[in-house]
Image (spheres, rainbow, N blue to C red):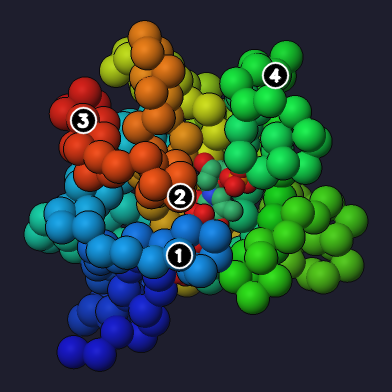
Amino acid sequence: MEPIYEGKAKRLFTTDNPNELRMEFKNDATAFDGKKKAQFEDKGRLNAAISNLIYAMLEERGIPTHFVRSISDTEVIVKKLEILMIEVIIRNTAAGSFCKRTGTEEGWDFSEPLVEFCIKSDELGDPLINEAYIRELKLATADEVAHVTKAALEVNQILQEFFLKAGLKLVDFKLEFGRLATDPSVLVLADEISPDGCRLWDVETGEKMDKDRFRRDLGGVMESYAEVLKRLS
Ligand code: ADP
Ligand code: TMP
Ligand code: ASP
């Protein structure tokens, strides 16, 4: 069966239900908007397991997500959405592009979480934008921006606590949201939450346990993902 979409890390397929999709996690890893590529055995399984566990936990805590059910080690049934073409990034601690943009050192904690928006476009390099850009580019309505901001901050609170119990500091992460195919007035959390789109540091040692190991050639990428899954399970 041909996928209806093949991305850098996942494939999407139709199902018998027009309002649901099958999402398959691949073993492919990319960084820097797809410029750096590799394959890691077991990556699809590890990210699917981590993301499913987190989405099930978020649903229990009252956050609506696209998660329907897991059907194999690497495949999940999700609600079909019209994805907002914005990435919502929450930062608790300075790292990554924040440090690059501001010329600051990595690792200092913010007084309050930072909310950032980027255009979801590899071609453009996911540029940082603000609410006025979102309005003028018609990427989302003002109500939707307010909704995703509130939801992302709630998710941050829940995840910070969840990861801390596993000895992990949630430095920053990216979320995607989409409008339900069955009711576009309803926005739900989409895509995945895994070490691909989060920065996670070991609380004791400060060791990086996420995709920065791949971005920075630190080695032990899958060992870290497996350790994250083990601690969360
Ligand atoms: P990318 O497109 O950035 O290469 P992936 O390889 O992870 O990323 O591909 C998954 C794609 O599926 C993403 O573009 C994401 O926005 C989209 N997506 C995630 N969840 C859903 C959903 N429930 N319905 C429709 N599209 C989704
Ligand atoms: P950044 O510091 O590179 O802007 O990344 C912030 C967080 O968002 C980090 O945890 C990685 C995640 N992220 C993605 O998942 N996808 C992306 O395309 C980008 C740019 C960041
Ligand atoms: N998610 C982007 C990519 O896969 C950017 C990154 O993670 O560095 O290329």
At mark 4, the secondary structure is strand
How far apart are the alpha carbons under marks 3 and 4?
27 Å
> Mark 3 or 2, which is nearer the eye?
2
Which residue is the site of mark 2? 215
**Residue at x 35%, y 85% (from the top left corner):** 4
Q: Are marks 3 and 2 in contact (CB under 8 Å)?
A: no
Whether residue 101 is visible to the viewer of this picture, yes or no, is yes
Residue at disc 2, secondary structure = helix
Q: Earlier in the sequence, mark 1 or mark 4?
A: 1
The residue indicated by pointer 3 is: 227
Q: Is mark 1 within 8 Å of ligand 3?
A: yes
- Sequence-first disc among 2 and 4: 4
Tell which circle, 3 or 4, labels the residue nearer the N-terminal end: 4
User: Which of pointers 3 and 1 indicates the residue nearer the eye?
Assistant: 1
1 and 4 marks in contact (CB < 8 Å) = no
Residue 43 on image: x %, y %: 22, 54
What amino acid type is highlighted by mark number 4?
Phe
Name the residue tied to disc 1. 36
Question: In the image, 142: left or right of 118?
Answer: right
Q: Residue at x 49, y 68 (%)?
A: 34
Q: Looking at the picture, does residue 67 appear above or below residue 7?
A: above
x%, y% of residue 48? 24, 51
Residue corresponding to mark 4: 110
- Residue at mark 2: C-beta within 8 A of ligand 3: yes
Q: CA distance from mark 1 to mark 4?
A: 30 Å
With 75 as the anchor, is 208 left or right in this view? right
x 10%, y 59%: residue: 72
> Residue 79's x, y, as percent?
36, 63
Viewer-proximal residue, 62 or 32? 32
**Which quadrant of the structure image shows residue 200?**
top left
